[in-house]
Image (cartoon, rainbow, N blue to C red):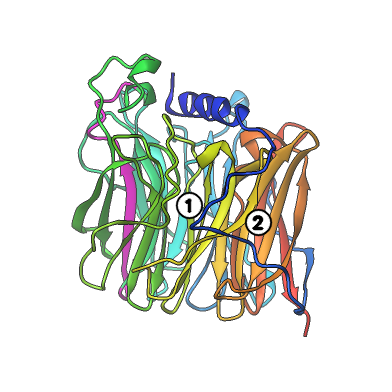
Amino acid sequence: MTRFTCSVWLLAAAVAACTPTAAPPDSAATSAPAPTRSAAATSAQWPLPNITAPAAQPDLVRAPDGSLLLSWVEHGDTARGGIAHTLKFARFANGAWSEPREIARGGDWFVNWADTPHIATTPDGALWAHWLRKHEGAGHAFDVVLARSGDAGANWSAPVVVNTDGTPTEHGFVSLWPVGENRIGIAWLDGRNTGGGGHSAHGGHASSGGKHKPGAMTLRSAVFDASLQRADEHELDAMTCDCCQTDAALTARGALLVYRGRTPAEVRDIRVARTDGTQWQPTAVVHADDWTMPACPVNGPAIATHDANATVAWYTAAGDTPTVKLARSNDAGATFAAPVVLERGAAVQGRVDTALDGNAAWALWIDEDENGQALRFARFAPDLSRELQRGEVAKLQGKGRGTGLPKIALADGAAFVVWTDVIDGKPSLHGARYAAAP
């Protein structure tokens, strides 16, 4: 059984056990504050670049110059001899999109709905991107590769392999962040200690058919310079959840990295690693949900920062009740206040994202019930003391995993959202813009 088959089966079993009854009280979490009178953010369709092929796996980030970078994977028609996958990007600035440009293409990539490529930029203007490449000669194994462009994406370097262990195991769920003027920080989940053999061989999954000695997925980080030379590689956590997304952002004091941890007792709560500008500090729990889960839920956290403030959004099913939460730090991630509960109940799927500036904190998540999927949002005061607005971004035609992970970014006083829908069996990207009334 592969990593994702195993994880999704076990998650489905856990969610199926949930009932829509009221959730047990959480003494360290609060319900979302009642909405207060505030200028509503009005929504409008956000036309995306001209994408002619089936496309999914979007990433959306704000560049230092205030523009937005959107990347996505186009899926080729291999039955007709097409390239299996192409990673592209476009820039949104001054109300218009640049022409899409190709970053890379290949027929040996590992691509799915959960472990997606990312794009980033450093203050020197360079662009960086990563994707996953199958490990040659191995089965369900793949490596993280990284490329850089110094000319606004017109040309890209040959990719370098980020994980250098050489083991035929799984590596992925990457986060990127700028380090100084021209270097990039990268973190990834690393399977070098798992023994390979697919996800069923990871620690905690031996009962699902694993034949190897259990070993834990780890969290590692490194820094790459403009010549793609590595430095400062560290193991940040020796035991993590196997296949939940990681996320990173910069505060005024250094980088914050969030991920789903894992204990020997199978508690899989959200943790944070932070730097003080020079070195990594010991990791800490964002909030003790105490969710005991015998398999990876494939549902990671998201983080956003503004100066020394941060918001973290995440999914949990502690108490057998699917829930999405949002927590705030005002000290660059050293501590977090009790989270706000955004929604709870059997329909909650998670797949969160968050954004933060001096005006508001935003959160996205997905619900799914008998009527289908819906992409929802909530907007709060930056300190989460007041809920300003909530609503539905879109009803989705697709169901299940194909609709992937939505993304949100803030620029020019507006919030921009991009998501995947599956229409007539083909994935496509869609966008919305939220602007506060004057």
Residue under label 2? 418
Image: 346 above or below 272: above
Q: Going 44% across and 18% down the picture, which residue do you hit?
A: 1
Image position, residue 88 (x, y; %): 54, 52
Q: Which residue is mark 1?
A: 301
- Tell me the residue at 53%/39% (across/down): 319
Vertical relation: 406 (above or below) 179: above
Which residue is rendered at x = 62% and y = 27% of the image? Answer: 16
Q: Residues within 10 Å of mark 2 (few under 14, many from 20)?
A: many
Specify the amino acid type for callout 2.
Val
Answer whether residue 423 is visible to the viewer in this image.
yes
Q: Tag 1, which secondary structure?
A: loop
Q: Which corner quadrant of the image does residue 209 belong to?
A: top left
- In this orientation, which residue lies closer to the viewer: 250 or 297? 297
Q: Position of residue 172 (x, y in %)?
A: 38, 42
Extent of the magenta region:
180-197
Instruction: Specify the quadrant of the image occupied by residue 330.
Output: bottom left
Residue 383: percent from the left, percent from the top? 54, 75
* Quadrant of residue 291 within the rendered picture: top left
Q: Looking at numbered disc 1 in the image, what kind of residue is underneath it?
A: Pro
Disc 2 on helix, strand or loop? strand
Residue 373 horizontal side relative to residue 229, left or right = right
Quarter placement of the C terminus? bottom right
Q: Is residue 172 left or right of residue 103?
A: left
